[in-house]
Amino acid sequence: MSRIELKKLVKRFKDTEVLSGIDLDVPEGSTLVLFGPSGAGKTVLLRCIAGAVEQDDGEVLIGEEDVTDVLPEHRGIGMAFQNFALFPHMDAFDNIASPLTACGKTADQIRAGVDTVAKLLKIDHVLSHTPKALSNGQKQRTALARALVSRPKVLLLDDPLRNVDAKLRFEMRLELPRLLADQGATVIYVTQDYREAMALGDRIAVLDGGRIIQNGTPEEIYRRPATINIAKLFGDPTINLLDVVPQSDASGVYATLSDRRIQLDPGLSGNVGRECVLGLRPEALSFTTANDGVPVTIEAETPFNEKAVTLVTTLRKREILVSRPAETPAPTSGTAHITIDPSDAVLFDRQTGIRLDPNGTTHTAEKAA
């Protein structure tokens, strides 16, 4: 069993509480991405799980075993650090092989294990090089290979692709899920790249201010973010956020843009008259030739390789981004109309920034965790 469970984990440095009662459950064989801004406590949390940092309170369980007081070398964990942590006097081969050597594997077993993982990570041509002769990307992949080579039941990966070039990073986003699935390990993967989080995680736990703010599937995090801050962390271009005060009549609950109604989920009726923020993903908006859409003025268009992003303004000069696939016909100047799918609209409380659920209550971090 390699399930990871954290119970009320607390870590302080002097008077600063870095982790504030973390509860987390990672099922056996799954990959959880730990996502959050710099300084959120992601690396500290990994080091507490590994035993490299001693927590001040709480428990760490791996499988059914409480390993809170177990030494790091006896926890059966593979870990790739942000700062590589390679042995400077060893070449890349021996760095990668070190876990197998420590386990007493034969020379043939060590060679086979190192060769397999080195080829996968495209560093088989630098195995004879010492760390000082490696690029940062090669060092990062060597550290990742060392974590993977012994096929541990638990893997803690601390932003292992940070220093890898863009092309290889894209390739690894495709390769890593298959590799991790083949190993059958339970994985906690730290990143600040939302694309990486969406591509690699069975679930994503968003850590901020020492707390898990939301824990859900990639789709849940993207489509139903728990807070405005989480909504802004996911997506490029960023989510449109517009101040609104929901209203209602016989037709249902609605907000207004450019004096046109945007129908909202009927379950949001408990928020009528409340100061809110309406969240609209740019790709959830589209241009229409129908005059019953929301009237806007086109200000600028920015082409990207796979999409085009248009900046428009409402009658009251509120800015909105509209994203569409590249080469899709759309107006490029003057006035136009856009349509909005009500199912893609997300409503937040303006003061707290917390998402409002259709039943009229606010979404809470405790519910998300």
Image (cartoon, rainbow, N blue to C red):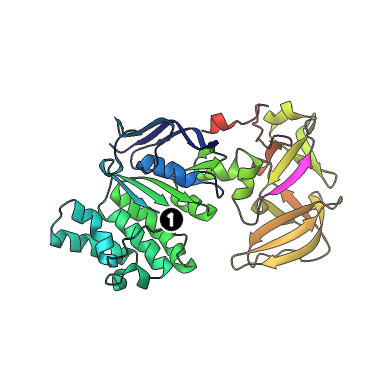
Place of residue 293 in the rendered image (x, y in percent of width and height, measured from the top left): 78, 50
Eyeballing the image, is 62 above or below 331? Answer: above
Nearest to the observer: residue 182 or residue 146: 146
Place of residue 115 in the rendered image (x, y in percent of width and height, measured from the top left): 24, 65
The residue located at (76%, 45%) in the rendering is 242
Eyeballing the image, is 210 above or below 166? Answer: above
- Magenta region: 236-246
Eyeballing the image, is 51 above or below 317? Answer: above
The verdict on residue 244 being magenta is yes
Residue beneath disc 1: 82
Nearest to the observer: residue 220 or residue 111: 111
Amino acid type indicated by mark 1 = Gln
Task: Describe residue 27's horizontal placement relative to residue 304 as left or right.
Answer: left
Nearest to the observer: residue 322 or residue 353: 353
Place of residue 320 in the rendered image (x, y in percent of width and height, measured from the top left): 75, 53
Q: How many marks?
A: 1
Place of residue 100 in the rendered image (x, y in percent of width and height, measured from the top left): 21, 55
Badge 1: how crowded within 10 Å, few (<14), some, or many (20+)? some
Task: Describe residue 79's horizontal placement relative to residue 165 as left or right.
Answer: left
Location of the N terminus (image quadrant):
top left
Eyeballing the image, is 48 above or below 158? Answer: above
- Quadrant in the rendering for residue 142: bottom left
The verdict on residue 296 being magenta is no
The residue located at (70%, 30%) in the rendering is 268
Badge 1 element: loop
Task: Describe residue 299's horizontal placement relative to residue 358 as left or right.
Answer: right
The residue located at (41%, 70%) in the rendering is 135
